[in-house]
Amino acid sequence: MKKKALFASMSEIRPSNSNTRIIAPGSSGRTPVATAAPFYAEYPENLGLTSERLRLRMVDRVRSQGVTDETVLAALASVHRHLFVDQALASRAYEDAALPIGHAQTISQPWVVARMLAAVCETSPKPIKVLEVGTGCGYQAAVMSKVFGQVYSIERVRPLYDTAKERLRQMGCRNVHLLFGDGMLGWAAHAPFDAIVVAAAGLKIPQALLEQLTVGGRLIAPEGQAQQRLMMMTRQSSQQWVRQELEAVRFVPLKPGVQS
Ligand code: SAH
Protein backbone atom coordinates (compact mmCIF):
# COMPACT_ATOMS: atom_id res chain seq x y z
CA MET A 1 0.00 0.00 0.00
CA LYS A 2 1.15 3.51 -0.81
CA LYS A 3 1.81 5.70 2.20
CA LYS A 4 2.40 9.44 2.12
CA ALA A 5 3.14 12.06 4.71
CA LEU A 6 0.39 14.55 5.56
CA PHE A 7 0.86 17.98 7.11
CA ALA A 8 4.37 19.28 7.30
CA SER A 9 3.59 21.41 10.31
CA MET A 10 3.72 19.73 13.68
CA SER A 11 3.71 20.81 17.26
CA GLU A 12 4.78 18.94 20.32
CA ILE A 13 3.10 18.25 23.62
CA ARG A 14 5.75 18.25 26.27
CA PRO A 15 5.26 18.05 30.00
CA SER A 16 7.44 20.16 32.25
CA ASN A 17 7.51 20.37 36.03
CA SER A 18 4.66 22.75 36.33
CA ASN A 19 2.97 23.53 33.05
CA THR A 20 2.10 22.37 29.57
CA ARG A 21 4.02 23.86 26.67
CA ILE A 22 3.19 23.60 23.04
CA ILE A 23 6.34 24.01 21.01
CA ALA A 24 6.10 25.11 17.40
CA PRO A 25 8.10 23.21 14.78
CA GLY A 26 11.63 24.47 14.41
CA SER A 27 11.28 26.80 17.40
CA SER A 28 13.85 26.84 20.17
CA GLY A 29 11.12 25.92 22.58
CA ARG A 30 11.84 29.04 24.60
CA THR A 31 8.57 30.79 23.78
CA PRO A 32 5.60 28.92 25.17
CA VAL A 33 2.52 29.31 22.96
CA ALA A 34 0.20 28.18 25.75
CA THR A 35 0.48 27.33 29.41
CA ALA A 36 -1.84 25.37 31.68
CA ALA A 37 -2.26 24.32 35.30
CA PRO A 38 0.18 21.77 36.79
CA PHE A 39 -1.53 18.71 35.36
CA TYR A 40 1.74 16.76 35.31
CA ALA A 41 2.78 17.65 38.84
CA GLU A 42 1.77 14.29 40.26
CA TYR A 43 4.11 12.42 37.87
CA PRO A 44 7.67 11.68 38.96
CA GLU A 45 10.00 14.19 37.37
CA ASN A 46 12.34 11.64 35.81
CA LEU A 47 9.52 9.81 34.03
CA GLY A 48 9.32 12.71 31.58
CA LEU A 49 12.98 12.25 30.70
CA THR A 50 13.01 8.48 30.42
CA SER A 51 9.67 8.49 28.61
CA GLU A 52 11.23 10.36 25.68
CA ARG A 53 13.50 7.40 24.93
CA LEU A 54 10.76 4.85 25.53
CA ARG A 55 8.47 6.75 23.21
CA LEU A 56 11.03 6.90 20.40
CA ARG A 57 11.61 3.18 20.81
CA MET A 58 7.85 2.64 20.62
CA VAL A 59 7.74 4.66 17.38
CA ASP A 60 10.61 2.58 15.94
CA ARG A 61 8.67 -0.57 16.77
CA VAL A 62 5.53 0.78 15.08
CA ARG A 63 7.62 1.72 12.02
CA SER A 64 9.13 -1.77 11.88
CA GLN A 65 5.58 -3.15 11.95
CA GLY A 66 4.92 -1.44 8.63
CA VAL A 67 3.61 2.08 9.35
CA THR A 68 5.61 4.50 7.21
CA ASP A 69 3.52 7.69 7.31
CA GLU A 70 6.02 10.15 8.80
CA THR A 71 3.35 12.61 9.97
CA VAL A 72 1.59 9.90 11.94
CA LEU A 73 4.89 8.62 13.37
CA ALA A 74 5.92 12.15 14.39
CA ALA A 75 2.55 12.62 16.09
CA LEU A 76 3.01 9.34 17.96
CA ALA A 77 6.46 10.50 19.06
CA SER A 78 5.13 13.80 20.37
CA VAL A 79 2.19 12.65 22.50
CA HIS A 80 3.06 11.50 26.02
CA ARG A 81 1.05 8.29 26.34
CA HIS A 82 1.96 7.81 30.01
CA LEU A 83 -0.16 10.86 30.87
CA PHE A 84 -3.30 9.11 29.60
CA VAL A 85 -3.15 6.15 31.96
CA ASP A 86 -3.28 5.75 35.71
CA GLN A 87 0.01 6.61 37.39
CA ALA A 88 0.36 2.99 38.51
CA LEU A 89 0.46 1.94 34.83
CA ALA A 90 2.63 4.80 33.59
CA SER A 91 5.78 2.64 33.44
CA ARG A 92 4.00 0.33 30.97
CA ALA A 93 2.65 3.12 28.78
CA TYR A 94 5.16 2.60 25.97
CA GLU A 95 4.59 -1.11 25.58
CA ASP A 96 2.65 -1.91 22.42
CA ALA A 97 -0.37 -2.94 24.43
CA ALA A 98 -3.88 -1.83 25.27
CA LEU A 99 -4.04 -0.85 28.97
CA PRO A 100 -7.07 -0.40 31.25
CA ILE A 101 -8.46 3.12 31.68
CA GLY A 102 -11.37 2.23 33.98
CA HIS A 103 -15.07 1.63 33.22
CA ALA A 104 -14.07 -1.65 31.50
CA GLN A 105 -12.41 0.30 28.67
CA THR A 106 -8.84 0.44 27.37
CA ILE A 107 -6.38 2.84 25.80
CA SER A 108 -5.70 1.67 22.24
CA GLN A 109 -2.46 -0.04 21.28
CA PRO A 110 0.01 2.45 19.71
CA TRP A 111 0.43 0.29 16.59
CA VAL A 112 -3.30 0.15 15.95
CA VAL A 113 -3.66 3.94 16.42
CA ALA A 114 -0.87 4.52 13.90
CA ARG A 115 -2.21 1.90 11.50
CA MET A 116 -5.70 3.41 11.44
CA LEU A 117 -4.51 7.00 11.07
CA ALA A 118 -2.01 6.11 8.33
CA ALA A 119 -4.72 4.24 6.43
CA VAL A 120 -7.16 7.18 6.39
CA CYS A 121 -4.29 9.53 5.38
CA GLU A 122 -3.74 7.74 2.10
CA THR A 123 -6.47 9.66 0.28
CA SER A 124 -5.94 12.65 -1.95
CA PRO A 125 -6.68 15.32 -0.88
CA LYS A 126 -5.58 14.58 2.67
CA PRO A 127 -8.26 14.55 5.37
CA ILE A 128 -8.60 17.76 7.37
CA LYS A 129 -11.85 17.38 9.35
CA VAL A 130 -11.98 14.00 11.04
CA LEU A 131 -14.36 12.19 13.40
CA GLU A 132 -13.33 9.69 16.08
CA VAL A 133 -15.90 7.42 17.71
CA GLY A 134 -14.78 6.36 21.21
CA THR A 135 -12.65 9.09 22.81
CA GLY A 136 -11.83 6.91 25.84
CA CYS A 137 -8.91 8.54 27.65
CA GLY A 138 -8.29 10.92 24.74
CA TYR A 139 -4.93 9.47 23.62
CA GLN A 140 -5.84 8.85 20.00
CA ALA A 141 -7.62 12.22 19.83
CA ALA A 142 -4.37 13.90 20.98
CA VAL A 143 -2.40 12.03 18.31
CA MET A 144 -5.04 12.98 15.74
CA SER A 145 -4.80 16.63 16.76
CA LYS A 146 -1.20 16.59 15.43
CA VAL A 147 -2.17 14.99 12.12
CA PHE A 148 -5.47 16.65 11.16
CA GLY A 149 -6.81 20.19 11.12
CA GLN A 150 -9.98 19.61 13.17
CA VAL A 151 -10.78 16.56 15.27
CA TYR A 152 -14.30 15.72 16.47
CA SER A 153 -14.56 12.88 18.97
CA ILE A 154 -17.53 11.25 20.70
CA GLU A 155 -17.55 9.22 23.95
CA ARG A 156 -20.57 7.40 25.46
CA VAL A 157 -19.22 6.95 29.05
CA ARG A 158 -19.66 10.20 30.99
CA PRO A 159 -16.69 9.97 33.40
CA LEU A 160 -14.33 9.08 30.52
CA TYR A 161 -15.67 12.01 28.51
CA ASP A 162 -15.22 14.39 31.48
CA THR A 163 -11.65 13.26 32.17
CA ALA A 164 -10.61 13.32 28.50
CA LYS A 165 -12.09 16.77 28.05
CA GLU A 166 -10.15 18.21 30.99
CA ARG A 167 -6.94 16.40 30.02
CA LEU A 168 -7.03 17.57 26.38
CA ARG A 169 -7.87 21.10 27.49
CA GLN A 170 -4.88 21.16 29.83
CA MET A 171 -2.67 19.79 27.08
CA GLY A 172 -3.77 22.63 24.82
CA CYS A 173 -5.32 20.45 22.10
CA ARG A 174 -7.56 23.25 20.90
CA ASN A 175 -8.50 21.62 17.61
CA VAL A 176 -10.15 18.67 19.38
CA HIS A 177 -13.91 18.98 19.95
CA LEU A 178 -15.54 16.45 22.25
CA LEU A 179 -19.14 15.29 22.51
CA PHE A 180 -20.76 13.13 25.19
CA GLY A 181 -23.16 10.93 23.22
CA ASP A 182 -23.70 7.84 21.13
CA GLY A 183 -21.06 7.84 18.41
CA MET A 184 -23.01 5.27 16.39
CA LEU A 185 -25.17 8.20 15.34
CA GLY A 186 -22.17 10.27 14.28
CA TRP A 187 -22.09 14.06 14.74
CA ALA A 188 -24.49 15.39 12.11
CA ALA A 189 -23.96 19.05 13.03
CA HIS A 190 -20.34 18.88 11.87
CA ALA A 191 -20.69 16.34 9.03
CA PRO A 192 -19.44 15.54 6.49
CA PHE A 193 -16.05 14.32 7.68
CA ASP A 194 -13.03 13.70 5.46
CA ALA A 195 -12.26 10.59 7.52
CA ILE A 196 -13.88 8.64 10.37
CA VAL A 197 -11.95 6.46 12.83
CA VAL A 198 -13.96 4.09 15.04
CA ALA A 199 -12.15 2.91 18.19
CA ALA A 200 -14.63 0.23 19.30
CA ALA A 201 -15.84 -2.92 17.52
CA GLY A 202 -19.40 -3.38 16.33
CA LEU A 203 -20.98 -6.23 14.40
CA LYS A 204 -21.67 -3.86 11.55
CA ILE A 205 -20.47 -0.37 10.66
CA PRO A 206 -23.34 2.03 11.46
CA GLN A 207 -24.97 3.44 8.32
CA ALA A 208 -25.18 6.90 9.94
CA LEU A 209 -21.37 7.03 10.00
CA LEU A 210 -21.06 5.97 6.36
CA GLU A 211 -23.51 8.74 5.43
CA GLN A 212 -21.39 11.34 7.28
CA LEU A 213 -18.28 10.61 5.22
CA THR A 214 -17.28 12.93 2.34
CA VAL A 215 -17.15 11.36 -1.11
CA GLY A 216 -13.56 10.15 -1.49
CA GLY A 217 -13.15 9.91 2.29
CA ARG A 218 -12.33 6.81 4.32
CA LEU A 219 -13.83 5.26 7.42
CA ILE A 220 -11.83 2.71 9.38
CA ALA A 221 -13.42 0.52 12.03
CA PRO A 222 -12.97 -2.84 13.73
CA GLU A 223 -15.79 -5.27 12.97
CA GLY A 224 -16.78 -8.43 14.82
CA GLN A 225 -17.03 -9.79 18.38
CA ALA A 226 -14.59 -12.51 19.51
CA GLN A 227 -12.94 -12.43 16.06
CA GLN A 228 -12.41 -8.89 14.85
CA ARG A 229 -10.95 -7.35 11.75
CA LEU A 230 -10.20 -3.78 10.74
CA MET A 231 -12.46 -2.69 7.87
CA MET A 232 -11.82 0.25 5.63
CA MET A 233 -14.71 1.82 3.75
CA THR A 234 -13.97 4.34 1.02
CA ARG A 235 -16.91 6.42 -0.16
CA GLN A 236 -17.01 6.37 -3.96
CA SER A 237 -20.23 8.34 -4.50
CA SER A 238 -23.35 9.36 -2.57
CA GLN A 239 -24.58 5.73 -2.57
CA GLN A 240 -21.40 3.69 -3.03
CA TRP A 241 -18.74 2.56 -0.54
CA VAL A 242 -15.85 0.23 -1.30
CA ARG A 243 -14.99 -2.20 1.48
CA GLN A 244 -11.49 -3.48 2.22
CA GLU A 245 -10.53 -5.97 4.93
CA LEU A 246 -7.34 -5.25 6.85
CA GLU A 247 -5.69 -6.94 9.87
CA ALA A 248 -7.16 -8.95 12.71
CA VAL A 249 -7.46 -6.73 15.81
CA ARG A 250 -8.92 -6.68 19.34
CA PHE A 251 -11.08 -3.74 20.49
CA VAL A 252 -13.65 -3.13 23.23
CA PRO A 253 -17.27 -3.35 22.01
CA LEU A 254 -19.12 -0.51 20.28
CA LYS A 255 -22.28 -0.02 22.34
CA PRO A 256 -25.44 1.98 21.66
CA GLY A 257 -26.72 4.73 23.94
CA VAL A 258 -24.85 6.47 26.73
CA GLN A 259 -23.68 5.58 30.25
CA SER A 260 -23.73 8.19 33.00
N1 SAH B 1 -9.63 6.23 21.41
C1 SAH B 1 -9.29 5.61 22.66
C2 SAH B 1 -9.80 4.19 22.72
C3 SAH B 1 -10.80 4.05 23.76
S1 SAH B 1 -11.53 2.46 23.88
C4 SAH B 1 -7.80 5.72 22.91
O1 SAH B 1 -7.23 6.69 22.50
O2 SAH B 1 -7.19 4.89 23.52
C5 SAH B 1 -13.03 2.70 23.02
C6 SAH B 1 -13.98 3.70 23.60
O3 SAH B 1 -15.14 3.67 22.80
C7 SAH B 1 -14.44 3.42 25.03
O4 SAH B 1 -14.13 4.52 25.83
C8 SAH B 1 -15.95 3.23 24.88
O5 SAH B 1 -16.68 3.76 25.98
C9 SAH B 1 -16.23 4.00 23.61
N2 SAH B 1 -17.47 3.65 22.93
C10 SAH B 1 -18.03 2.44 22.73
N3 SAH B 1 -19.19 2.57 22.05
C11 SAH B 1 -19.35 3.90 21.79
C12 SAH B 1 -20.35 4.67 21.15
N4 SAH B 1 -21.45 4.12 20.60
N5 SAH B 1 -20.18 6.01 21.10
C13 SAH B 1 -19.10 6.61 21.64
N6 SAH B 1 -18.13 5.94 22.28
C14 SAH B 1 -18.24 4.59 22.36
Image: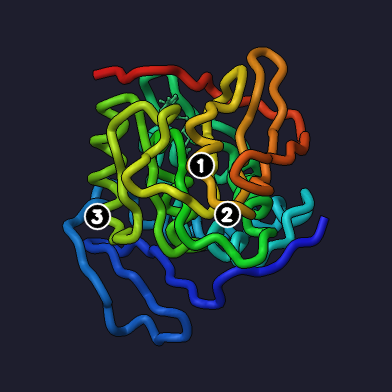
Quadrant of picture, ligand 1: top left
Dot in front, 2 or 3: 3
Q: Nearer the viewer, residue 225 or 219?
A: 219
Figure label count: 3
Q: Quadrant of the C terminus?
A: top left
How far separated are the C-alphas under marks 1 and 2? Answer: 9 Å
Which mark is first along the chain, 3 or 1? 1
Is mark 1 in CB contact (under 8 Å) with mark 2? yes
Q: Secondary structure at mark 3?
A: helix
Residue at (67% x, 45% y) in the render: 234
Which residue is situated farthest in the top direction here? 226
The residue at which mark 3 appears reads as 170
Amino acid type at circle 1 is Ala
Rendered image quadrant of residue 21: bottom left
Quarter of the image that includes the N terminus: bottom right
Q: Amino acid at mark 2?
A: Leu
Q: Is residue 23 above or below residue 68?
A: below
Image side of residue 232 versus residue 176, left or right? right
Q: Where is 139 relative to 210, above or below? A: below
Cα distance in 3D space between marks 1 and 3: 20 Å
Crowd band around label 2 with a 10 angstrom C-alpha radius: few (<14), some (14–19), many (20+): some
Say whether mark 3 is within 8 Å of ligand 1. Answer: no
Whole-percent x, y for residue 64 in the image:
78, 54
Could you give the CA–CA distance between mark 2 and mark 3, rounded to whole angstroms? Answer: 23 Å
The residue closer to the viewer here, 217 or 65, is 217
Comparing 73 with 222, the one in front is 222
Whether the residue carrying mark 2 lies under 8 Å from ligand 1 is answered with no
Q: Where does label 2 land, which residue?
A: 54
First in residue order: circle 1 vs circle 2? 2
Q: Can you tell which mark lies on residue 14?
A: none
